[in-house]
Amino acid sequence: MIVIVDYKAGNLRSVERALGRLRVPCMISGSTGEILEAERVIFPGVGAAGRATKDLKESGIDRVLRKVFDRGTPFLGICLGAQIILERSEENDAGCLGLIPGTVTRFPSTLHGDEGRRLKVPHMGWNGLRLKKHHPVLKGVLETDEFYFVHAYYPVPAREVHVIGTTEYGIAFPSVIGTRNLLAMQFHPEKSGAPGLRILDNFARWDGRHAE
Amino acid sequence: MLSKRIIPCLDVRDGKTTKGVKFEGNVDIGDPVEMARLYYEQGADEIVFYDITASSDKRDIMIDVVDRVAGEIFIPFSVGGGIRTLEDMRLVLLAGAEKVSVNTAAVQDPSIIAEGARAFGSQCIVLGMDVKQVDPTEGISSGYEVVINGGRTYTGKDALKWALEAEALGAGEICLNSIDADGTQEGYDIQVTSLISGRVGIPVIASGGAGTTGHIHEVLTEGLADAALVASMVHYGTFVIGEIKERLSEQGVKVRRTWG
């Protein structure tokens, strides 16, 4: 059973619905016991880092997620869930989980596109993914596939080896990061049509291992 | 790079998709859930629903539509029309919509934008604006005035100032509809779109007037729009979204082209 971690952070049902379409059993839970016992964990999130990390701490879910990561449970972070696995976020200057060394930073307001126009923040809409390495969860993703993003902040792992894929928006920013049994993406696979569903389907089969 | 989005818009009345010209003479044209699924399969990047159900005691019908759509399509979609309170927003978002759009209610009480953004995040809150061209005055220096009630009521608000105010209040996106162009299929209002999209820091969806791929190309380039709303063009089968995107791509506009 996949457990979708409930910590009051946004639209969990869209992840549940996407897994439902794939006929993958899942449950939404904020119970530390259920999260700890899960076969796989999805850590979604929409909203601000400060509020989210506060809720995680108060519910004790922060410590459980650390345990889930340590025991090798396949772990998927989505959007805000791909940010607060790092050590610190510039957003609300929030202390985060620290599963991957690094920080979360905001797109500079000075980004410019190809035609010299100022790029808007948040980065909202469909964009591509340039993979730096293979990963079992990203199997079948094509170079031309695009994914749905909506965010103003992005994760910056301290170590290059933790960057799995990047996306271009004025700069090439890390859009998929991971280590060991943890993979996290800044975009929303549950809202990215068929290529996104493919990623969720791959995750539902992933044993949590891959060569780094 | 980020793709420009093509967004079909479905007006829904009493649970049925409907289409009118300049907000008058609507006719039912199909089941919104079925149409959303079709557009999803044809490569729509997002879908916008406007609930134009007149009576508020039929709101449940729309919530049911939203719930069924969310089980069928796996791209973002927004719902507008009749959203007046945080509770209205909550119901629509819980039913599975990604975003809600506020229009008249925000004009009457702009704090709904800030409250919505605080409760659900800016990315959820779309400001829908209907605008009409007017003679520029001191109060309405852009020459475009915000109108409500489907264009029947002038608000005295300058369109550009209202867009900037809504952004400051926390709106995450603007859906800008030209009442003059709406339903004509004679092209978007490029002037007001570029005026507003060039000034705000949030994405702008252009709405009203799409009749050809040339119109869409124009609003996404010259009009500086981040996304284009289409309705009649695709509802009657004149154009298929995939073909529109193919054409735009040939003309150098970056659009999402694989969705299989």
Image (tube, coloured by chain):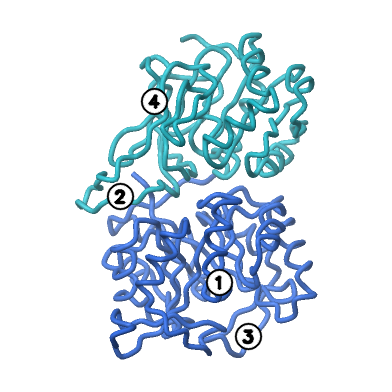
Chain colours: A cyan, B blue
- Asked if A89 appears above or below B242 in the picture, the reply is above
Dot 3: few (<14), some (14–19), or many (≥20) neighbours within 10 Å? some
Q: Chain of mark 2?
A: A
Q: Which mark is residue B26?
A: 3
Of all residues shown, which one is farthest toward the left? A116
Q: Residue at x 65, y 72 (%)?
A: B82
Q: Which element is circle 2 on?
A: loop
Earlier residue among tags 4 and 2: 2
Q: Residue beneath label 2, please?
A: A119
Measured Cα–Cα span from mark 3 to mark 1: 29 Å
Instruction: Report the front residue among B132 and A126.
Output: B132
Earlier residue among tags 3 and 1: 3
Q: Residue beneath label 1, please?
A: B109
Measured Cα–Cα span from mark 2 to mark 1: 30 Å
**CB under 8 Å between callouts 4 and 2?**
no
Dot 2: few (<14), some (14–19), or many (≥20) neighbours within 10 Å? many
Measured Cα–Cα span from mark 3 to mark 2: 38 Å
Q: Are marks 3 and 4 on the same chain?
A: no
Q: Which element is circle 4 on?
A: strand
